[in-house]
Image (cartoon, rainbow, N blue to C red):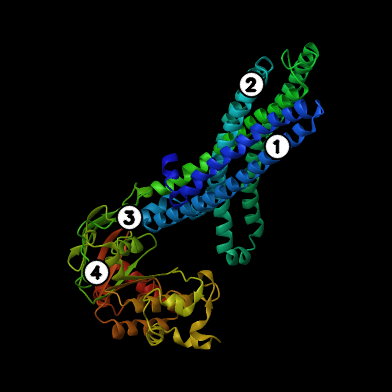
Amino acid sequence: MIKKLAARVRQYKRQAILTPLFMVGEVAMEALIPLVMSWLIDRGVEAGNMGQIFLYGGVLILTALISLLSGTMSGRMAAVSSAGFARNLRHDMYYNIQDFSFSNIDKFSTSSIITRLTTDVTNVQNAFQMILRMAVRAPLTLIFSIIMAFTINARISLVFVFTMPVLALGIATIMTRTHPIFKRVFKTYDKLNNVVQENLRGVRVVKSFVREDYEEKKFNTISESIYTDFVHAEKNLAFNGPLMMTCIFGCTLVISWLGAKAIIASGNNPALGLTTGQLMSLITYVIQILGSLMMVSMVFLMITMSRASAQRIVEVLDEKTDITSPENARTEIADGSIDFDHVSFSYASRSERATLEDIDLHIPSGAVVGILGGTGSGKSTLVQLIPRLYDVSGGCVRVGGEDVRSYDLTALRESVAMVLQKNELFSGTIKDNLRWGNEQATDEDIMEACRLAQADPFIQDFPDKYDTWIEQGGTNVSGGQKQRLCIARALLKKPKILILDDSTSAVDTRTDALIRAGFRSYIPDTTKLIIAQRVASVKDADLIIVLDNGRVVDTGTHEELLARCEIYREVHDSQTKGGEDQ
């Protein structure tokens, strides 16, 4: 995991390497300062020698300036490298997600991916910066300070040897108790983000059903869970401070007592015991040594906190799409003919029952095909196999006479346009959204596609017309307007296969008929698959497919199915004769 994360430093390696190097300079100067101070006191102040005071005072100022400069540069390099590291992490995760197939995306919820890209990356970034600085500073300070302390007086410095095991045991206990809590709390963050996202996307439904209290209760339950976990974790972490301060004050008292006795016993003679300046230096080294141990504990705690986040990030980085382009992939699609050769399919998460079973269909290029069936009959799953959003579990899907698995993915999906019932519009102008279908489309091309999709009349009513700004998700246009814009976007692509997945459900029957007429004139050679709930939307199709429980019940024209297919006839009668019973 560490190796995979470290590889994301990339172009910021220089700053990451310079950070600890500058830190060495800062720590070395900080270790010298107490020693120079002892010389200043013993050889200058107590001896009354102004020359020595000026000499060691100058050295003290110089070491302090070098320490300050080194620390500043180290901090700057750490900030650049950690921010760059986080940038690369988000970049690699996001780009990897773009290659996911639908089955890969099914493994991660939207809210979980957002948490991993934001909160988890921030946690790992903070840990990385702390490792570059504190994880280098603390051990170096510890080593340098212990060496200097033992150089001054080895017997008194043995106090540290007895203190360190106590600290190590305390830190290990805190880490062991805290890591499982942080691991749990980040999963709870996923649930929190999911609740917030769901609430905001469905805010109109929430308000129309007056369910604000229910949504607040859901939010409060999860928020309370996060609060409880963090309080529990912070209670464990709270022991770190008192533990450290107890050790620091204890060591200071013991060293002061032993040092005072040594000074008195030696008559302030350095050759026999300890000087006043050396005692002050030892006390300073006590603070540095135990302070460095406190830094080590902070580093371990930050690593403990970020470890769960790092694991979640690596999960996304390691996830590889199960749908890829083959070697020597075909890039040319001959036509829009589609063949389902005894196709079966089941979702990995719902493997107890096949979603599609033994689908055997042959659709010629340029045909208009209607697909009808009840909820859960497999209509949407069927058409998602054509552009390889999922791969078949059994059998074979052919486009243009070739297995879809033999095509380059980009080439295949460029030849297939899908318009979903809940298609997405993105923040930007109407033109920006429509050019998703064809980046090179002219204004005339855009207007023609919109006229065929029956979108031009309502666009002309907007003050800014085609430059009207669309809010994220298309919240400032109606459902029918959004569907017509999405259809226009698909038309601009001029695909070999056009799939309409119940994408005219929000428009009236007259507009629906005009849109279908536009298809015949604008893209006559394109194979058109129309999933619909209304018989009127597919009755003029060259072929109508009736699905039920993942199987093809019957195929034929409108008249043929009325004559022999009971399911089709029931749907037709319920829609055309329902008004007569009232």
Please name which of the two marks, 2 or 3, marks the residue nearer to the observer: 2
Circle 4: residue type: Thr
Instruction: Name the spot of residue 551 as percent of width and height, x first.
Output: 28, 59
- 61 vs 192: above or below: above
Disc 2 from disc 3: Cα separation: 77 Å
Foreground tag (4 vs 3): 3
- Sequence order check, earlier mark of 2 and 4: 2
Mark 3 = which residue?
355
Which residue lies most toward the left here? 401
Mark toward the viewer: 2 or 4? 2
Residue 317 in picture, x, y percent from top left: 41, 48
**Cα distance, mark 4 to mark 3?**
19 Å
Q: Earlier in the sequence, mark 3 or mark 1?
A: 1
In the picture, residue 449 is in which quadrant?
bottom left
Query: Which residue position holds label 1?
Result: 60
Mark in the foreground, 2 or 1: 1
Q: Which residue is mark 2?
A: 151
Label 2 vs 1, first from the N-terminus: 1
Residue 474 left/right relative to 237: left
Crowding near pointer 1: few (<14 within 10 Å), some, many (20+)? some
Picture quadrant of residue 547: bottom left
Label 2: element kind: helix
Task: Classify mark 2: residues with Cα within 10 Å, few (<14), some (14-19) or many (20+).
Answer: few
Classify 423 as above or below 513: above
Amino acid type assigned to the residue bearing label 2 in the image: Thr
Could you give the CA–CA distance between mark 4 and mark 1, rounded to whole angstroms? Answer: 93 Å
* Front of the two marks 3 and 1: 1
